[in-house]
Image (spheres, rainbow, N blue to C red):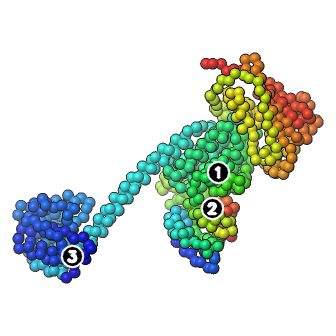
């Protein structure tokens, strides 16, 4: 697992590699804490995410809450089919923009 | 010569040597290196003087009277057990034969006479570093062990708490089969089941994010709401909304409950399901082998407000050969040796016709899949059998507390306008108030059934103009409920009025229940005084009311129904 992020204008892109689960918690929290007013939009790039568990879903909820629960503020992109399936089971399409 | 810096605490050395010259010389050199030195003239004196708290390094001569260096080292090591204090053997040219024994006894290094100050300094510094590293590690190990003890303790407490919450009020049902491993419970899996007063079976299967104590704490209000509302006859939609509301208030942002609520309705042979974030369920027909997948189509509970939740409830017309198979993610994620998960296919492939128990079959093929790995032990599997035979339902005996109230005469009425009807099912609230006015608790189930039937008839056939004949086919059944939901949402006028009146009658009382609606009424053909001709219209419902009540009459073109229920004082025994 590894997490990296880049800020481009007002869009923060967070890349999550490997297993996105409780072991990622600390690193993900650090990324959350680094979000300031300047960030208007967060893209979570799951191109290299292999797996999500429910605590990862919880972390996404934290991210959404950090962005003041604006549905359009957080986009989950490039999820592999198995990861997308988990997001769909939880119906997270209602809370996030999935693309 | 390098000296420890001033802000380091002064290191302490114990020098053990029978030669006073050697003692003096080594002490002097160590003092130059800023050591505080204690000396002993033989092994025994060293043991007597030795204080682990006051010693950072020991210099040990080998051959000494009373107790030699090797024995003394062995005894010191014994006394230290886990702690580490470096012991350096002081050797002369002729002592090389002892080297092995020195190491064996617990020595860490050697220093040769005559002493070289630079070598002495280097060796002591490196051994002290080792000692610090070692003691840090011991500290950490202690911390970890203490932490683990707390964790184990909490684990146990959580498991006990969980057991109590889930078991309190837990009603077994012959239709419900489940396997919940202790690990799954600790991981926040929860299974609840209870019967409503109208003899419907409500089931909740849930999976909390988070573990142990947190999940146990959160499961408590969820279970209370589930049992409380089921006992009062609320439907799974209201129960789901209420649990969601509570959890939204209670849980931190990153926690939620993935859950499915199912309601098995014996009267209509209907299975209603609200799925909120659990993996797909399967509705399996034992006879035909058909498998219908029920996917989650709502958000997990505790994330957004109930008013935004917009729950989708699915209805399935079911027969006794059908089983609802539900599980949490532990089963589909269970891996074999090669790391392949059991998956949805693992479950599906275990579902066969002409087998005595699909439940056992799933567990068996799961065990085969896991092979020697087995016992990963995070397994929750539930089978709800849609069996409506009376013996499966007769077990439920509600023994309510009876509050004896003198039969009295009273009338009460409530009118529900269409916006109220869209929001809630008024029956539980109305029936509960009747219980409070007259203490009719022993007859709660019967009254609940009658009020429900009358209300549903008024709403479905009166206000919403739904045709019961739709319900005759399996597809029609789901269509019927969808149409109902649709029409209810579109409903812009109309109301339903309930009038309850009660008077003393013989050795008890007579309750009259009148339900009026502003719909178009029943069509002329079916609205004859002969109620039996209404059979096709409302199916078992009307029949049920007639069995329970002493009379049932329709008037004003079918827009009002009046049922009377006569009750006797229960015998005191």
- Sequence-wise, which precedes: disc 3 or disc 1? 3
Occupied quadrant, residue B308: bottom right
Q: Say what secondary structure mark 1 lies in.
A: helix
Query: Which residue is labeled 3 in the image?
Result: B123
The chain containing the residue under callout 1 comes to: B
Query: Which residue is labeled 1 in the image?
Result: B244
Q: What percent of the width, then of the height, locates residue B548? A: 76, 27
Labels in figure, total: 3
**Which residue is farthest top?**
B506
What quarter of the picture does the N terminus of chain B occupy? bottom left
* Position of B123 relative to B242 (above/below): below
Q: Say what secondary structure mark 3 lies in.
A: helix
Q: What percent of the width, then of the height, locates residue B306? A: 68, 52
Q: Say what secondary structure mark 2 lies in.
A: helix
What quarter of the picture does the C terminus of chain B occupy? top right
Crowd band around label 1 with a 10 angstrom C-alpha radius: few (<14), some (14–19), many (20+): many
Whole-angstrom CA distance, mark 2 to mark 1, is: 21 Å
Disc on res. A86: 2
Q: Nearer the viewer, mark 2 or mark 3?
A: 3
**Looking at this view, is B381 or B368 the one in front?**
B381
The residue under the point 77% across, 27% down is B410
Q: What percent of the width, then of the height, locates residue B184? A: 53, 51
**Looking at this view, is B64 or B289 the one in front?**
B64
The chain containing the residue under callout 3 comes to: B
The residue under the point 69% across, 61% down is A94
Discs 2 and 1 carry the same chain letter: no
Whole-angstrom CA distance, mark 3 to mark 1, is: 66 Å
């Amino acid at each position: 697992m590894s997490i990296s992020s880049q800020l481009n204008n007002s869009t923060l892109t967070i890349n999550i590699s490997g297993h996105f689960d409780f072991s990622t918690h600390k690193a993900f929290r650090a990324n959350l804490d680094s979000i300031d007013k300047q960030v208007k939009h967060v893209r979570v790039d799951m191109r290299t995410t292999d797996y999500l568990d429910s605590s990862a879903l919880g972390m996404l909820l934290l991210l959404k809450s950090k962005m003041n629960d604006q549905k359009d503020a957080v986009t989950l992109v490039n999820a592999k089919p198995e990861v997308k399936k988990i997001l769909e089971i939880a119906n997270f399409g209602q809370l996030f923009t999935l693309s | 010569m390098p000296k420890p810096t001033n802000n380091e605490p002064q290191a302490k050395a114990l020098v053990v040597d029978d030669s006073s010259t050697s003692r003096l010389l080594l002490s002097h050199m160590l003092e130059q290196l800023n050591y505080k030195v204690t000396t002993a003239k033989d092994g025994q004196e060293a043991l007597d003087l030795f204080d682990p708290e006051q010693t950072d390094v020991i210099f040990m001569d080998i051959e000494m009277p009373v107790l030699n260096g090797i024995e003394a080292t062995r005894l010191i090591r014994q006394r230290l057990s886990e702690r580490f204090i470096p012991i350096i053997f002081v050797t002369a040219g002729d002592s090389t034969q002892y080297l092995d024994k020195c190491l064996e006894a617990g020595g860490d290094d050697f220093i040769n006479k005559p002493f070289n100050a630079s070598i002495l300094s280097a060796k002591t510094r490196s051994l002290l570093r080792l000692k610090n590293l070692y003691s840090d590690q011991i500290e950490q190990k202690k911390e970890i062990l203490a932490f683990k003890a707390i964790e184990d303790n909490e684990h146990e407490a959580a498991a006990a708490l969980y057991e109590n919450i889930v078991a309190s009020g837990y009603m077994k049902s012959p239709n419900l089969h489940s396997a919940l491993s202790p690990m799954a419970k600790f991981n926040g899996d929860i299974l609840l089941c209870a019967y409503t007063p109208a003899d419907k079976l409500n089931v909740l299967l849930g999976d909390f994010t988070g573990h142990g104590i947190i999940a146990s704490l959160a499961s408590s209000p969820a279970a209370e709401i589930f049992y409380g509302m089921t006992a009062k006859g609320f439907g799974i939609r209201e129960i789901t909304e209420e649990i969601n509301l509570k959890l939204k208030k209670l849980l931190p942002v990153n926690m939620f409950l993935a859950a499915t609520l199912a309601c098995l309705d014996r009267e209509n042979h209907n299975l209603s399901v609200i799925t909120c974030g659990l993996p797909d369920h399967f509705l399996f027909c034992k006879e035909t082998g058909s498998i219908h997948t029920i996917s989650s189509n709502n958000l997990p509970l505790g994330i957004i407000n109930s008013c935004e939740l917009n729950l989708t409830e699915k209805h399935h017309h079911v027969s006794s050969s059908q089983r609802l198979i539900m599980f949490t993610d532990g089963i589909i994620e269970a891996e074999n040796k090669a790391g392949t998960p059991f998956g949805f296919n693992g479950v599906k492939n275990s579902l066969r016709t002409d087998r005595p128990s699909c439940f056992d079959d799933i567990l068996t093929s799961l065990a085969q899949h896991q092979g020697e790995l087995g016992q990963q032990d995070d397994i929750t599997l539930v089978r709800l059998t849609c069996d409506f035979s009376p013996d499966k339902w007769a077990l439920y005996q509600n023994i309510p507390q009876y509050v004896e109230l003198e039969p009295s005469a009273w009338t009460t009425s409530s009118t529900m306008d269409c916006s109220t009807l869209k929001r809630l099912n008024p029956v539980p609230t109305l029936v509960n108030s009747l219980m409070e006015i007259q203490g009719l608790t022993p007859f709660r189930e019967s009254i609940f059934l009658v009020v429900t039937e009358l209300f549903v008839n008024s709403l479905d056939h009166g206000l919403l103009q739904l045709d019961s004949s739709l319900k005759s086919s399996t597809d029609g059944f789901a269509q019927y409920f969808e149409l109902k939901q649709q029409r209810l949402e579109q409903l812009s006028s109309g109301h339903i009025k309930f009038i309850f009146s009660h008077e003393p009658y013989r050795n008890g009382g007579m309750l009259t229940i009148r339900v009026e609606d502003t719909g178009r009424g029943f069509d002329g053909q079916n609205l004859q005084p002969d109620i039996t001709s209404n059979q096709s219209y409302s199916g078992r419902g009307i029949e049920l009311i007639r069995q329970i009540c002493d009379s049932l009459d329709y008037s004003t073109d079918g827009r009002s129904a009046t049922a009377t229920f006569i009750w006797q004082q229960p015998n005191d025994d």
